[in-house]
Image (tube, rainbow, N blue to C red):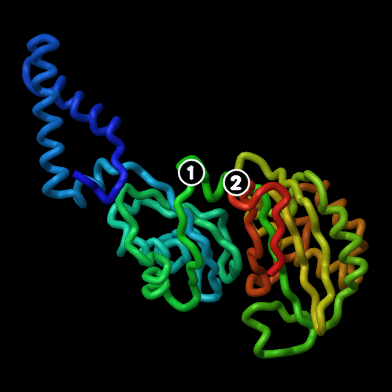
Amino acid sequence: MVLSFPIDWLHLQNQCRLHAIFHGNQRGDEGCADRYIRAYLKVVLFVSLFPANFAEKYGKLTRYFLHLAYDGTQYSGWQVQPAVVTVQSTLHQALGIFVKDLKAIIGCGRTDTGVHARDYYAHFDTRGDLPDEIVYRLNAVLPKDIAVFKCFAVDGQLHARFHATERTYKYYVHFKKDPFSNAYSAYHKQPLDIEAMNEAASHLVGEHDFSSFSRSKTQVSNNICHVFSAYWEPIPEGAVFHITANRYLRNMVRAIVGTMFLIGENKLKPLAIKEIIEARNRNAAGKSAFPQGLFLHQIIYPTLHGAGYRECF
């Protein structure tokens, strides 16, 4: 008998053995072995008659990664929440059409309402086969503001959230009023002092407690993040903030950008950012910048991308 899906035979045999021991009176080793053989033969018969049903229960779990991007304008962030539409709930609904035993989709991180992602990874587990052209089929049922690029099997221990070592965000701001830029960039009425903001950004680099740039009452064990790089890049009629870190707190990047605006307007000195970090108090920092200018730009997994991987796009 040839099956089109992998079987965890050890798990199956253990289940049959438990079945044999549990049912009926034990008649010594010989009787137990007889019951085990009968149970095993029943399962083999069931597999041959109903392979799809068997796969969902006893097939070997395979972990898949999805590589995707999304426009966050119409979504209340990534994570599932009651009574609102999120990217995770929309993706789960679409994937559930093709993966009948889908339990959960785990993302590489949370993005807030209105925030976009150019480079996003999520994983899910299944015991069954994926249909041919799963990426094409997913994109056919997903709305136009979510695109899946790849779906590929990975080691069962690889976790989309916990094994990402670097995450890069970009925040776009434009200084000239433009109705066609507002969906993906924040409008600032006057130009900002980029040199002063870059001086302030240098104080973000390193391992710090970023409580001053985090929402209160978040469910994390600590507020320590390691920022690898942070800088402002001038572009025509605007600027882009780049930041790369091992992790982020909720609302962290937008709170940093909002504080940077005060420095760029010369309302605060560049060194003030260091004092704000040391305060560990959200009230010490500026208001959060608008969400539409923020993009999750790149996620790095050493096992997928290799050590020191960088990609420019």
Residue flagged by tag 1: what amino acid is it? Asp
Residue that sits furthest to the front in the current view: 1
Q: Earlier in the sequence, mark 1 or mark 2?
A: 1
Q: Where residue 17 appears, x then y in whole percent?
A: 20, 24
User: The N terminus lies in which quarter of the figure?
Assistant: top left
Which sits in the foreground, 47 or 198?
Answer: 47
Q: Quadrant of residue 143?
A: bottom left
Residue at the (35%, 49%) spot, across then down: 126
Q: Quadrant of the C terminus?
A: bottom right
Disc 1 to disc 2, C-alpha distance:
10 Å
**Which residue has dot 2 on it?**
303
How many marks can you see? 2
Q: Which mark is residue 155?
A: 1
Q: Quadrant of residue 196 in the image?
A: bottom right
Does the residue at mark 1 contact the one at mark 2 (Cβ under 8 Å)?
Answer: yes
Amino acid under disc 2: Thr
Q: Position of residue 268 (x, y in %)?
A: 89, 64
Question: In the displayed structure, does residue 91 sit left or right of residue 98?
Answer: right
